[in-house]
């Protein structure tokens, strides 16, 4: 339902050129939830804008539902629903007025397509007269999704739909996405949350405008081929600095309450290193070998292309 082939994008400014996308290719099948994972500035929003016909790429080609995003942009617009990263609804219109407005843009009505949004709209109904700007984060996101679905799109583009939303609303939102994909709707969704990446059928890791890897979450995690050790100590900030200074260390990043560390050689003597950290004055030093997650694989890939800090 979505095919992108070598999509490139350069923003031209007066004195410089910003390369936002470098020959990105991807395919999303019918009913598939495809997650685009990457840090701020990686190029996710630019790709969304190109695929939803709002921006012309400087290279490559793409189609949505079999329609070319440049030559057949009108057809594409009729079959896609797009929820941009920033809340883009009319803050001064009520919940119901926003929905009616978006329905009218697509020459349809709230009633005609009510079944499509029923599950989500029922949660919004008690607030239907409230101005959109006065809704909570979770409610705004549900209204955004209703507006993106009101014309029964075949493909949904959701740019960081759950950023800044509470965990319960995030969970409900993902339950809705699963139902929509079960109904045959294809979803391209970007998220900075790795726990959400695991809920996608496949994910693409995007960094500095390039696609580093595409696969299922499970397979990506298994591609991590380095020994991974979690370190903890009383002074975590000093520990991070000291681990990074050790020549045998390949990468070291903060993950929750520990430092995920990989080594240049997989037979690196970790216990001897831990002892040297204790000798250097660290207290409460603990370490254990752990299984890699997607974030570890992402960090390993980005470490190859950056300065060792991952970004
Ligand atoms: N209109 C623009 N003019 C010039 N540069 C731009 C423009 N839009 C985006 N960029 C640059 O292109 C790169 C990719 O930006 P983009 O917004 O696509 O990334 P992103 O992954 O969506 O990040 P974020 O979540 O922060 O929006 C960044 O370097 C950004 O500064």
Image: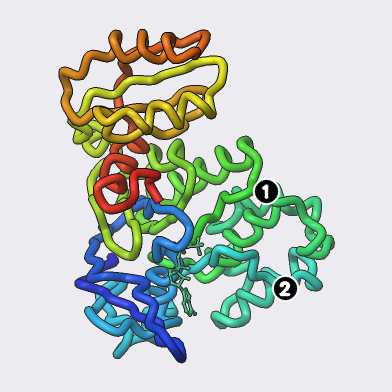
Label 1 crowding class (10 Å Cα cut-off): few <14, some 14-19, many 20+? many
Q: Residue at x 31, y 44 (%)?
A: 201
Q: Residue at x 20, y 72 (%)?
A: 6
Query: Residue 301's quadrant in the figure?
Result: top left
For the residue pair 3 and 182, the one nearer the viewer reads as: 3
Residue 242: x and y, percent?
Answer: 42, 27
Residue bearing mark 2: 90
Question: Can residue 183 be seen by looking at this rendering?
Answer: no
Q: Residue at x 56, y 15 (%)?
A: 234
Query: Residue 271's quadrant in the figure?
Result: top left
Left or right side of 62 for 11: right
- Per the image, label 2 sits on a secondary structure element best described as loop
Q: Is mark 1 within 8 Å of ligand 1?
A: no
Image quarter hosting the N terminus: bottom left
Residue bearing mark 1: 138
Quick one: which residue is furthest to the front in this view?
Answer: 280
For the residue pair 2 and 272, the one nearer the viewer reads as: 272
Label 2 crowding class (10 Å Cα cut-off): few <14, some 14-19, many 20+? some
Real-space Cα separation, disc 1 to disc 2, in angstroms: 16 Å
Residue 78: x and y, percent?
Answer: 43, 78
Q: Earlier in the sequence, mark 1 or mark 2?
A: 2
How are the residues colored?
rainbow
Left or right side of 182 for 110: right
């Amino acid at each position: 339902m979505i095919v992108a082939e070598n999509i490139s994008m350069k923003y031209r400014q007066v004195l410089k050129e910003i390369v936002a996308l470098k020959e990105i290719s991807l395919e999303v099948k019918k009913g598939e939830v495809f997650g685009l994972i990457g840090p701020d500035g990686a190029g996710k929003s630019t790709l969304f804008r190109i695929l939803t016909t709002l921006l012309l790429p400087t290279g490559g080609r793409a189609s949505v539902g079999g329609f070319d995003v440049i030559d057949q942009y009108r057809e594409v617009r009729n079959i896609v629903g797009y929820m941009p990263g920033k809340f883009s609804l009319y803050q001064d219109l009520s919940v119901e007025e926003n929905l009616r407005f978006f329905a009218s843009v697509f020459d349809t009505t709230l009633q005609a397509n009510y079944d499509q949004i029923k599950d989500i709209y029922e949660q919004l109904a008690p607030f239907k007269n409230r101005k959109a700007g006065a809704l909570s984060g979770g409610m705004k996101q549900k209204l955004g999704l209703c507006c993106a679905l009101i014309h029964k799109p075949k493909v949904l583009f959701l740019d960081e739909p759950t950023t800044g939303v509470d965990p319960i609303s995030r969970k409900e939102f993902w339950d809705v996405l699963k139902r929509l994909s079960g109904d045959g709707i294809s979803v391209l969704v970007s998220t900075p949350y790795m726990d959400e990446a695991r809920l996608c059928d496949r994910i693409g890791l995007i960094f500095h405008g390039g696609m580093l890897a595409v696969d299922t979450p499970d397979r990506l995690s298994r591609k991590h081929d380095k020994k991974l050790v979690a370190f903890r100590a009383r002074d975590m900030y000093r520990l991070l600095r000291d681990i990074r200074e050790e020549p045998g260390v390949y990468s070291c990043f903060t993950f929750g309450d520990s430092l995920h560390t990989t080594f240049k050689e997989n037979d690196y003597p970790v216990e001897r290193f831990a002892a040297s950290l204790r000798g250097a004055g660290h207290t409460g030093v603990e370490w254990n070998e752990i299984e890699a997650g997607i974030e570890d694989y992402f960090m390993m890939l980005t470490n190859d292309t950056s300065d060792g800090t991952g970004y």
